[in-house]
Image (tube, rainbow, N blue to C red):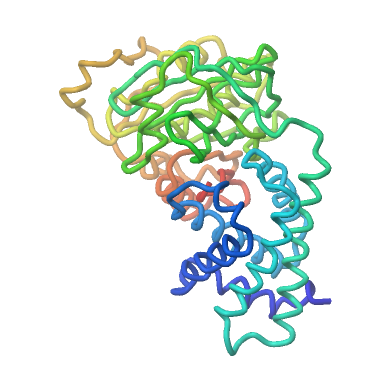
Amino acid sequence: VSLEDPDSLRVLRDALGPEEPGAAELVRQFYSHWFALDVSVRDLFPPEMDAQRAAFGHALHWVYGELVEQRAAEPVAFLAQLGRDHRKYGVLPTHYETLRPALYAALRTHLGDTWTAAVDAAATASLNLITGVMSGAADAEVGPAWWDGTVVEHHRVSRDLAVVRLRLDRPMHYHPGQYVNVHIPQCPRRWRYLSPAIPADPDGGIEFHVRQVPGGLVSAAVVNETRPGDRWRLSSPHGGLQVDRGGPDVLMVAGSTGLAPLRALIVDLSRYAENPRVHLFFGARYRCELYDLPTLWQVATQNPWLSVSPVSEYNRDPAWAADYPDVTPPRGLHVHQTGRLPEVVTKYGGWGDRQILVSGGPAMVSATKAALIAKGAPPERIQHDPLSR
């Protein structure tokens, strides 16, 4: 009954809300409790915990939001995948036995006087569900906990951008549009989500496009320090970006290296003779950062269902562009447009009759989604990966 008590579940959800002043402290207290209960857990996490705490708090808030709405299928599937994925960190079933009381204690302390018998029952039942599903899925999984691979190519395609190709020791199956968690030798115990830019390769080839982000240790190391021969570790795939080949025409909006999962989908579609029409807007700050235009042009010339519109915020390239490959495609693509992606895309309307896929940084995805909805696009037609991954 406690999982069918939306009012009590709402109390737990709101305690973790991004607008809740004490939410970050609640999550910090949880990890402090957990590490005190089981010191072996601390070594599984990176030295700096800010990103880990933020991601965990966001995920927990989403799970409770789904439970409030009495939607269990998606959170259960998400938690099962999370449990399987956590095997790569070395998380064991015994760790979940200490996670549950640590999170219970942090919630109870945070909620203070608002902790009622009903909230207690909802917390107990929900934490049993969360830890039970994660632990059970991890225990039942017979597939590998990770895939190791060797960097075979590293191309610095612009000042802040690199294309990295690896050969995995064993092939990984994933659907085009999915993403994986990646660990590189330069940044021990720090993982970052990256989207393969090509469909799964039975020979183990895989390609990533990485942009260096301010303050990003992993992205900076990939762009500046990665070399052929480096050994990377990848986790099992996540995400559900997809194109229904039997559905309506498609709008894709890619900001910078957000192109990668959409490119994998486009390459996969190119195996078929008939597809819905796909219109891709590919955007960056400068023209010189539209790094994959030559490849996109080649695909578009051979596949009449694909149209590509290049967009840059600035019309002129900076001086440093001369140090990197020229990415100007031959004549034949749509006319280059200048402006911010959300404004350029919605200049043509709300695209409400399309399958819509948006990929890029969280701010770009949020702004594009809001602009499309304001122009009449149904929110349920807009696909994007979780903004906090």
Q: Is residue 278 above or below residue 325?
A: below
**Quadrant of image for the N terminus:** bottom right
Task: State left or right for residue 189 relative to residue 102.
Answer: left
- Image coordinates of residue 298 in percent, x first then y, are 48, 11
Residue 289 vs 95, above or below: the answer is: above
- Give x and y (percent) for residue 181: 57, 36
On the question of residue 202 being in view, the answer is yes
* Location of residue 81 with respect to 180 vertically, above or below: below
**Could one spot residue 305 in this view of the protein?**
no
Q: Residue at x 35, y 39 (%)?
A: 213
Instruction: Name the image quarter holding residue 69.
Output: bottom right
Q: Which residue is drawn at 46% across and 34% down?
A: 258
* Apparent side of residue 267 relative to residue 337 in the rendered image (left or right): right
Residue toward you, 240 or 226: 226
Give coordinates of residue 36: x percent, y percent. 58, 64
**Measuring 54% from the left and 31% from the top, which residue is drawn there?**
195
Out of 46 and 172, give the one closest to the viewer: 46
Of residue 105 and residue 324, the one placed in the foreground of this image is: 105
Determine which quarter of the picture holds residue 309. top left
Q: Please, which residue is most extreme toward the left here?
A: 319
Between residue 262 and residue 248, name the one nearer to us: 262
Give the residue displayed 48% in from the left and 49% down from the top: 369
The location of residue 99, given as percent across then percent down, is: 67, 61
Is residue 113 left or right of 324 when viewed as pictured?
right
Q: How many labels does the image show?
A: 0
